[in-house]
């Protein structure tokens, strides 16, 4: 840190007698920090560092660092062709959940909304005159988002993110595994717990030794065998090449799941029945919520290093400042 002692000169107008100070191009009016220092502090907010660390590195108080960062303001001016939406647990502004809106095609965070209520979302998106430019609306299985898409983006194709579809089958299989595991002795139960990842792996990726271990585990329970086959069949359906092939594969899977009669898979069946139209749209669309989920993980890091951020506007600007640092 360099301190510059500068005696600012005062002048007197020979005509009117008015007194004024000389203009210093590198120092804003009423400031003691130079433009370069202020720019550096704002730039440091792009990194994964707490406000306390940023202020310590620049030898200013945390309040001063926050005041300079408050000069930064982001605003979404238009909507993209591929709009992705998801919620995350932010605990800011008195609300538990906030909403993140991204451009799934160009991997850019567009905005952060204070809550996930239908009214907030509807009012926000109705302010845009470019809503007709949205061709794909990528989301998870949230009824509020579906209603939003129908009202604000009636011409857009609603796409359910594949990750949120696959995990329905994974959750169902895990519930069967846990239920069957609870019936075993302590030694066998510990073995199953350590072998959880083997059961979740796709059979084609197993080694010969791992395949033998899985076969032994499946012999212990008929319900586990059925659940394992259902999970694998569902993953095969999700790897369908196009919408037509996916439609036929989904029909076959539903028949098999209904025949197996495993209660743990009923929520998965209901989700498939309720959202099949939008799930199948994902096979004609290459865009997912992957980038949005990655942003949510980074937001968790921001919260952790900051020990939480209660001020929503500050939290929003920090997220946008970090995520769009390459823009």
Image (tube, rainbow, N blue to C red):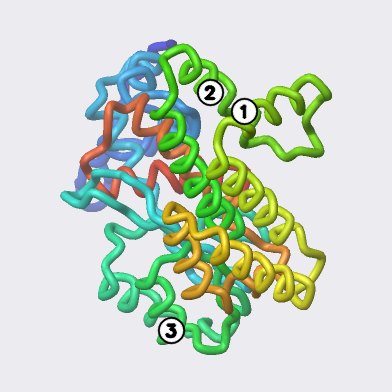
Any mark on residue 192, and which? 2
Which of the two discs, 3 and 2, sits closer to the camera? 2
Image quadrant in which you'd find residue 253 = bottom right
Measured as percent of width and height from the top left, residue 73 is found at 39, 53
Q: Earlier in the sequence, mark 1 or mark 2?
A: 2
Q: Is residue 325 above or below residue 159?
A: above
Q: Are marks 1 and 2 in contact (CB under 8 Å)?
A: yes
Q: Please, what secondary structure does the residue beneath circle 1 have?
A: helix
Q: Please, what secondary structure does the residue beneath circle 2 have?
A: helix
Question: Distance from label 3 to label 1 (Cα)?
Answer: 50 Å
Question: Distance from label 1 to label 2 (Cα)?
Answer: 8 Å
> Horizontally, is 207 left or right of 120 in the view?
right
Measured as percent of width and height from the top left, residue 299 is found at 43, 39
Q: Residues within 10 Å of mark 1 (few under 14, many from 20)?
A: some
- The quadrant in which the N terminus is found is top left
Which of the two discs, 3 and 1, sits closer to the camera? 1
Q: What residue did someone put label 3 on?
A: 152
Q: Is residue 97 above or below residue 78?
A: above
Determine the residue positioned at 44% across, 58% down: 86
Let me know if residue 56 appears in the view.
yes
Measured as percent of width and height from the top left, residue 310 is found at 21, 40
Q: Residues within 10 Å of mark 2 (few under 14, many from 20)?
A: many
Any mark on residue 217, and which? 1
Image quadrant in which you'd find residue 207 = top right
Let me know if residue 36 appears in the view.
no
Q: Earlier in the sequence, mark 3 or mark 1?
A: 3
In front of the other: 320 or 254:
254
Q: Please, what secondary structure does the residue beneath circle 3 have?
A: helix
Determine the residue positioned at 25% across, 36% down: 30
Measured as percent of width and height from the top left, residue 146 is found at 43, 76
In front of the other: 131 or 212:
212
Determine the residue positioned at 24% across, 46% down: 92
């Amino acid at each position: 840190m360099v301190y510059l002692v500068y005696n600012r000169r005062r002048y007197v107008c020979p005509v009117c007698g008015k007194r004024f100070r000389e203009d210093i191009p590198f120092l804003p009016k009423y400031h003691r920090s130079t433009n370069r220092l202020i720019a550096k502090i704002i730039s440091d907010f792009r990194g994964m560092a707490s406000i306390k660390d940023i202020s310590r590195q620049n030898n200013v108080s945390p309040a001063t660092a926050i005041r300079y960062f408050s000069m930064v303001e982001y605003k979404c001016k238009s909507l993209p062709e591929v709009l992705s939406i998801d919620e995350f647990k932010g605990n800011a502004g008195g609300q538990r959940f906030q909403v993140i809106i991204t451009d799934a095609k160009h991997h850019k965070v567009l905005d952060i909304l204070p809550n996930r209520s239908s009214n907030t979302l509807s009012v926000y998106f109705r302010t845009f005159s470019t809503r007709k430019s949205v061709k794909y609306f990528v989301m998870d299985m949230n009824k509020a988002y579906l209603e939003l898409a129908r009202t604000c983006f009636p011409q857009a194709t609603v796409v359910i993110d594949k990750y949120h579809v696959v995990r329905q089958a994974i959750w169902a299989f895990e519930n069967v595994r846990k239920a069957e595991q609870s019936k075993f002795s302590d030694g066998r139960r510990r073995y199953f717990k350590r072998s959880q990842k083997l059961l979740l792996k796709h059979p084609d990726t197993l080694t010969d030794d791992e395949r033998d271990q899985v076969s032994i585990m499946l012999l212990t329970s008929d319900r586990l065998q059925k659940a394992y086959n259902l999970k694998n069949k569902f993953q095969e359906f999700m790897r369908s090449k196009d919408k037509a092939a996916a439609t036929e594969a989904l029909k076959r899977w539903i028949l098999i799941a209904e025949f197996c009669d495993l209660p743990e898979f009923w929520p998965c069946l209901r989700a498939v029945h309720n959202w099949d139209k939008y799930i199948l749209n994902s096979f004609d669309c290459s865009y997912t919520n992957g980038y949005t989920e990655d942003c949510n993980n980074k937001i968790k890091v921001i919260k952790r290093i900051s020990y939480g951020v209660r001020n929503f506007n500050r939290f929003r600007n920090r997220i946008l400042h970090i995520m769009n640092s390459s823009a």
